[in-house]
């Protein structure tokens, strides 16, 4: 971790934490007091199969996300029934009350803060 002149430099190659899912993994670094996640989600990854069991069976995500899609595709479904599909280069603001899943046959890589 560099702290030259107040700048903090971090790398996902040296994470503060890691989380393994049934269909993927995430590396987490702390920058400026906040967590930044890099998730590599395999085809078949979904909120229902990979996160809900870890979240005590919650029916939707209670978190707010700022997300950048590096590669692959995801679909997001809000509790109100609205849906968004996102792919490489898309940035999203996702409020609480959503579910998501990987689309297609390639992994989806996301940066989330």
Image (tube, rainbow, N blue to C red):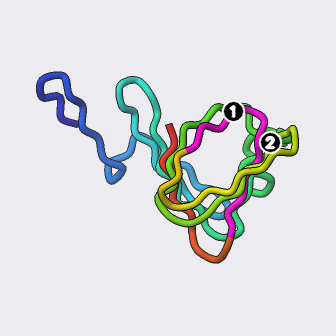
Element on which disc 2 rests: strand
> Residue 5 falls in which quadrant of the image?
top left
What segment is highlighted magenta in the picture? 92-103
For mark 1, does the 10 Å Cα neighbourhood hold few (<14), some (14 to 19), or many (20 or more) residues? Answer: few
In the image, residue 32 lies at what x, y percent?
A: 35, 25
Name the outermost residue toward the bottom: 105
Q: CA distance from mark 2 to mark 1?
A: 9 Å
Q: Is residue 94 magenta?
A: yes
Compared across the picture, whether 38 is left or right of 54 comes to left
Contact check, label 2 and label 1, Cβ < 8 Å: yes
Residue 8 position (above or below residue 59): above
At numbered mark 1, what does the secondary structure look like: helix, strand or loop? Answer: loop
Q: Earlier in the sequence, mark 2 or mark 1?
A: 2
* Mark 2 surroundings: few (<14), some (14-19) or many (≥20) residues within 10 A: some
Residue in the image at 87% along x and 38% along y: 80
The quarter in which the N terminus is drawn is top left
The answer to whether residue 53 is seen in the rendering is no
Q: Residue at x 80, y 42 (%)?
A: 78
Q: x%, y% of residue 51?
A: 72, 48
Where does residue 15 sit, x and y in percent of width and height?
38, 45
Q: Is residue 108 magenta?
A: no
Residue at which label 2 appears: 78
Residue pictured at 64% horizontal, 77% vertical: 105
In this view, the residue in front, 84 or 33, is 84
In the rendered image, residue 109, in percent from the top left (x then y), is placed at: 51, 59
Q: What's the mark number on residue 95?
A: 1
Residue 58 in sight here: yes
Identify which residue, 84 or 19, lies in the foreground.
84
């Amino acid at each position: 971790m560099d702290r030259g002149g107040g700048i903090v430099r971090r790398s996902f190659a040296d994470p503060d934490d890691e989380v393994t899912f049934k269909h993927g993994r995430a590396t987490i670094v702390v920058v400026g007091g906040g967590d930044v996640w890099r998730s590599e989600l395999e085809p078949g990854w979904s909120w229902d199969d990979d996160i809900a069991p870890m979240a005590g069976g919650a029916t939707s995500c209670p978190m707010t996300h700022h997300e950048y899609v590096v590669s692959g595709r995801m679909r997001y479904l809000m509790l109100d029934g609205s849906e968004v599909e996102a792919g490489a280069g898309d940035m999203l603001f996702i409020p609480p009350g959503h579910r998501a899943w990987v689309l297609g046959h390639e992994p989806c890589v996301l940066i989330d803060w």
